[in-house]
Amino acid sequence: MSELVRVLLADDEPLVRGGMRLILDGEPDLEVVGEAGDGAGAVALARELRPDVVCMDVRMPGVDGIRATELVLRQPDPPRVLVVTTFEHDDHVLDALQAGAAGFLLKRAGADEMVQAVRTVAGGQSLLFPDAVRRLVRTRPRAADGVVRLSGREREVLGLVAEGLTNAEIAARLFLGVETIRSHVSSCLAKLGARDRTQAVVKAYQSGLIEL
């Protein structure tokens, strides 16, 4: 990622895009490089402009934000996707997280929250809201147990990830080194086939590897 974070906005409401552009372009380290009014446009512009972050509305005509997220993340060296939604209990948000979105942001969020959310996902971190994710997962039937097997320590670490703790906080809680925790988290992601911590937590909840 370059020092300047390049952002693509995808929303079918021009006023929403305009407001987001005004906020993000006002920051010295953020630049809106393009806008799309639907999912198909977002996929095409992501391929053409190579942004660092795509702010993706989940509900758009034609190709919606969920399918667009899947397609964007299939591209070589894909950007991070930050889902933007009106309602945090929107079932589409969970679909987008399962598709690989790094987190979600409510449209009613303040300017500072929006800026911090973009910076967080651009830096390779997940934007995990533990309570919101648990509420979303509860709306879906639990998936049948698969072949994924985690060690006791990996389950413990993943449970703390689900609480929203950072690697450093987990290390302090378990009296282990940060590198050890990072290794456990990486192992969990690999075993679950997850892109990041958010997707790993969703998959773990739905498969019963960790309890709600």
Image (cartoon, rainbow, N blue to C red):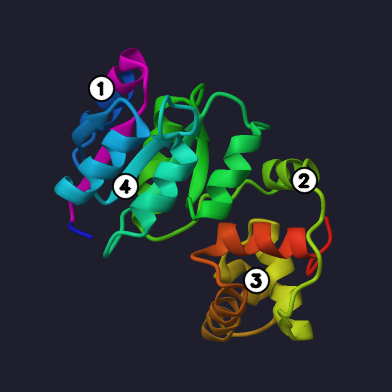
Q: Is residue 197 left or right of residue 112?
A: right
Please state the horizontal and vertical placement of residue 186, each as a whole percent of the image. 53, 78
Asked which secondary structure carries label 1, the reply is: helix
Asked which secondary structure carries label 3, the reply is: helix
Label 4 or label 3, whichever comes before in sequence order: 4
Asked which secondary structure carries label 2, the reply is: loop
Q: Are marks 3 and 2 in contact (CB under 8 Å)?
A: no
Label 1 or label 2, whichever comes before in sequence order: 1
Specify the label residue 170 is tagged with.
Answer: 3
Q: Residues within 10 Å of mark 3 (few under 14, many from 20)?
A: many
Q: Residues within 10 Å of mark 4 (few under 14, many from 20)?
A: many
Q: Are marks 1 and 3 in contact (CB under 8 Å)?
A: no
- The part of the chain drawn in magenta is 3-18
Label 1 or label 4, whichever comes before in sequence order: 1
Q: Amino acid at mark 3?
A: Ile
In this figure, which residue is indicated by the disc labeled 1? 22
Q: Residues within 10 Å of mark 1 (few under 14, many from 20)?
A: few
Specify the label residue 53 is tagged with.
Answer: 4
